[in-house]
Amino acid sequence: MKLLIVDDDGLIRDSLKLMLETTDGWTARTAADGEDAFVKCREELPDIILMDIRMPVCDGVEATRKIKEAFPEVKIVMLTTFTDDGYITSAINAGAEGYLLKSTPADGIIERIRAVEKGAMVFDKGVNLSAKKPEAVIFDILTERENEVLALVATGLSNGEIAAKLFLSPGTVRNAVSVILEKLELRDRTQLAVYYWRNSVG
């Protein structure tokens, strides 16, 4: 797998490169900012990009938007120190497949990269996705209860956790998820999360 590490801190870039290239079959290149990342993508398209948020010249959110427009097949995971939900929402709306913190252990980063490669959307446990209220996004095609369930699916909760939170049975939640998938014509929970966050306000 070909990776591109984008960070304005040279020590972080080099450390991540060394760490990721210990994984069999993985190669990693580096870029110092979003503009540099775009140039590197034009030279050789990576499979996955690890993208910092705050950088000079072109920040991570703008770079994600620009790269996704030109190369939609490239998957991008934000790797940052910031947990502000404004950054998180902006990154997801720009097209990012995940949001990880630099404090994530090395094996955790590798595990999540593998998950993104398989089509999952990943978030660090330290990222407070639940900061956004369920009513922040309302889909007219769904009932009030279905909107609540969708919002909680988007924060990464399991059916059991959603059931406990909404005082429902796991079976009721499971049925609701199936109905939501059918109404929105989506395939799985990952697509539900992506759909929710990319239609999120703010």
Image (cartoon, rainbow, N blue to C red):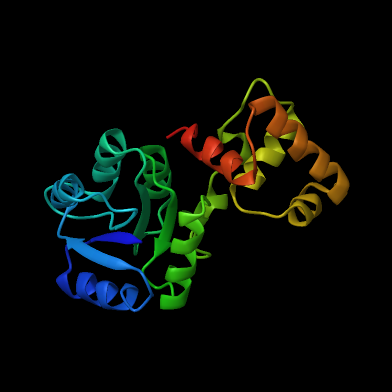
Query: Is 184 placed above or below 175 here?
Result: above
Indicate the position of residue 167 as horizontal and vertical percent values. 84, 49
Give left or right: position of 135 versus 8.
Answer: right
Q: Nearer the viewer, residue 3 or 60?
A: 3
Indicate the position of residue 193 as horizontal and vertical percent values. 57, 43
Q: Nearer the viewer, residue 187 or 173?
A: 187
Indicate the position of residue 9 as horizontal and vertical percent values. 18, 68
- When asked about the image quadrant of residue 185, the answer is top right
Q: Nearer the viewer, residue 38 or 7?
A: 38
Q: How many marks?
A: 0
Which residue sits at x=39%, y=46%? 96
The quadrant of the image that shows the C terminus is top left
Q: Nearer the viewer, residue 174 or 137?
A: 174
Give left or right: position of 185 versus 194.
Answer: right
Which residue sits at x=76%, y=32%? 179
The quadrant of the image that shows the N terminus is bottom left
Pick out the residue farthest to the front. Answer: 25
